[in-house]
Amino acid sequence: MYVIIVGAGEVGRSIAANLEDTHDVVVVDRDSDVTEELTYSLDVLTIRGDGTDLEVLREAGLEQAGLVIACTDNDETNAVVCGAAKATAEVFTIARVRRRTLLETWQGSQGAFGVDFMVCTDLLTAQTIFRISGLPSAHDVDTFAGGLVRMAEFDIPEDSPIVDRTVSEADCYDSLTFAAIFRDDEMIVTRGDTVIRACDRVVVIGSPDSMHDFADEVATTPDDTEEVVIVGASEIGFQAAREFEEHGFRPRLIEQDHERAREVAEALPNTMVMESDATNSEFLAREHVGEADVVVAALDSDEKNLLVSLLADRLGVDRTVAIIETPEYADLFETVGVDVAVNPREETAEEIIRFTRTDHTEKIAMLEHDRAEVIEIEVGPDSVLVGQDIVDAAAELPDGVVIGAISRGGEHITPRGSTAVQPGDHVVVFVDATVLDEVVELI
């Protein structure tokens, strides 16, 4: 497919890097330094120009494009790009926005702005924060098959009971599959005799109940999340509080700006809004923030979020989640003591990339900066999985693939060697990114 990406920030760059091997990609950006750098670092065509200018879009090949992705940092610009592209060519358009109000306007008016699909960065990030907060020790959590299946990546602490046990010994769950282990810079696709070590990150796929049981087994923090504190009434902080409210929680939110604090207090009836500087350790101690199960740092800078997270950790908070805008900081934050670092731009790129895949790909989740993916695929009659047991089908798949779960008619099926996949089933698969295209073609 011929793809035009307008905006070469972190989102645009991530999408372009993911698509360069399988699609014809053109990236449009106003900054000549950015386009020049992309020309040398990625196998894509770059054009310096304003994506809202129809002539620039035509120069980028709009007439032959199958997909236009507008992912600049300006919501209105992205809407204009999609509108111009849609009015001129038969093309599928995707717009990235930050404001949930724009998403709700688009959802309430079919075809508004000329946008076929809209991705709201702040809402996606808030939903990710909520999912992660519900599972102790989890770094990445996603749902598949309409909620029947979950995938999570867990840190294995030194005192976890599964340390130094093989996968076969640790696997005592009815509907859970051990998919892979990330150990330092190594990725290990698990087998029965794979030994789990302290500080590993283990990727598991299974039912929500089994996922919670596994979390209880490996975690050193309590499973029940009750007390939630959100620091910063940024749009992400606001949406996170709203997400917790919608699931029955009564979070506390700390915001220093008087007007913003009043605004969110009026909009969030089940959230206690406190007007204060959250970097004030005396205030945090006085308000018993250390007793919280989760503290979410959603201020306007990575450095402030790091400081708040470390202060919360020092006070005794069970888990800290920090929003980071700089992807390179993620590993650093988690090394120095932040439990989970969430990058809004990575969440957005992941959601958009799903639309560039085969029609049978229902959902994807990227792991460890796209070293591997967990994908949900609807199985067709020509799939290599159909007509034989999984153990036999696996021999025809490349290394680096694990069938994690199957959804059939609303029922969760845990795959075993003798399980037979049927056409129409939805399979959730862990895949090494280096063999992803081959696997999607076969399944």
Image (cartoon, rainbow, N blue to C red):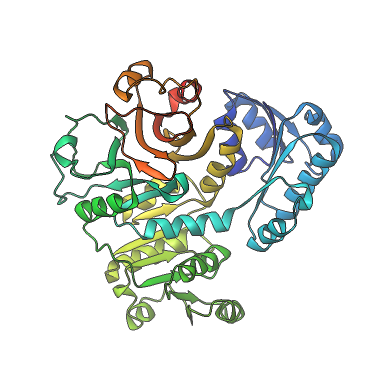
Question: Taking 282 as reference, is 118 left or right?
Answer: right
| Residue at 35% across, 66% down | 294
Quadrant showing the N terminus: top right
Residue 430 x %, y %: 38, 33
Q: Which residue occupies the foreground of this view, 11 or 143?
A: 143
Quarter-wise, where is residue 55 in the image?
Answer: top right
What residue is rendered at 33% in x and 48% in y?
Answer: 207
Rendered position, 323 above or below 56: below
* The quarter of the displayed image where residue 105 is located: bottom right
133 vs 100, left or right, is left
Question: In the image, is residue 440 above or below residue 230?
Answer: above
Q: Is residue 443 above or below residue 157?
A: above
Which x, y percent locates residue 225? 33, 67
Quarter assignment of residue 14: top right
Q: Is residue 181 visible?
A: no
Q: Is residue 295 visible?
A: yes
